[in-house]
Image (tube, rainbow, N blue to C red):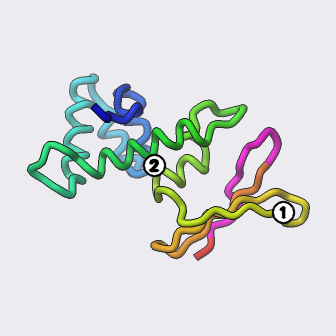
């Protein structure tokens, strides 16, 4: 019922794994026909399931829910798929930041995402046409 939008298209769902797989793993997962790829995708997520033996895979659901959020919330004029933006990628990988602060530094608009659990902050600078560029990772 609550299937993430990003899981409804096989090609899109495996392309989103590029953020968390090595190039070799990605190439292996995406080789073959659609049926083989679907089977490999299923096997991959089964290996990540924190509650083996239940029909619901929390890890897969969380990953693709983040991808859905990124798709819709980090779109730009140039990139209609917010999951493909740098903020989308960070959101997919780490989830919702604990805090977000906006400021002006040297006459440039910045957005800083804070993650306490991993002790990192990601600093984005807003460029032309609302494009965010990751300029620094601290922590």
Residue 19's disc is: 2
* Residue 131 drawn in magenta: yes
Name the side, left or right, on which 137 lies relative to 42. right
View extreme (right): residue: 107
Which residue occupies 13% across, 53% down? 52
Q: Is residue 38 above or below residue 68?
A: above
Q: Is residue 117 above or below residue 34?
A: below
Q: Find the magenta span and give its range.
A: 127-137
Q: CA distance from mark 1 to mark 2?
A: 30 Å
**x then y, percent, for residue 117:** 46, 73
- Mark 1 vs mark 2: give the one in front: 1
Q: Nearer the viewer, residue 89 or 53?
A: 53
Q: Quadrant of residue 30?
A: top left
* Residue 43 drawn in magenta: no
Which residue occupies 35% across, 49% down? 62
Name the side, left or right, on which 60 lies relative to 107. left
Give the position of the C terminus as an image quadrant.
bottom right
Q: Nearer the viewer, residue 60 or 15?
A: 60
Which residue occupies 22% across, 38% down? 42
| Residue linked to disc 1 | 104
Give the position of the N terminus as an image quadrant.
top left
Name the side, left or right, on which 99 lies relative to 57. right
């Amino acid at each position: 019922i609550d299937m993430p939008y990003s899981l409804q298209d096989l090609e899109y769902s495996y392309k989103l794994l590029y953020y968390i797989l090595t190039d070799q793993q990605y190439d292996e997962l995406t080789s073959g026909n659609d049926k083989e790829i679907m089977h490999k995708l299923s096997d991959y997520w089964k290996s990540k399931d924190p509650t083996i033996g239940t029909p619901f895979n929390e890890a897969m659901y969380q990953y693709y829910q983040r991808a859905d959020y990124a798709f819709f919330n980090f779109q730009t004029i140039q990139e209609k798929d917010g999951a493909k933006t740098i903020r989308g990628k960070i959101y997919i990988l780490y989830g919702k930041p604990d805090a977000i602060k906006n400021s002006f530094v040297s006459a440039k608009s910045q957005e800083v995402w804070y993650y306490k659990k991993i002790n990192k902050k990601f600093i984005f600078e807003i460029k032309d046409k609302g494009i965010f560029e990751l300029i620094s990772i601290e922590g």
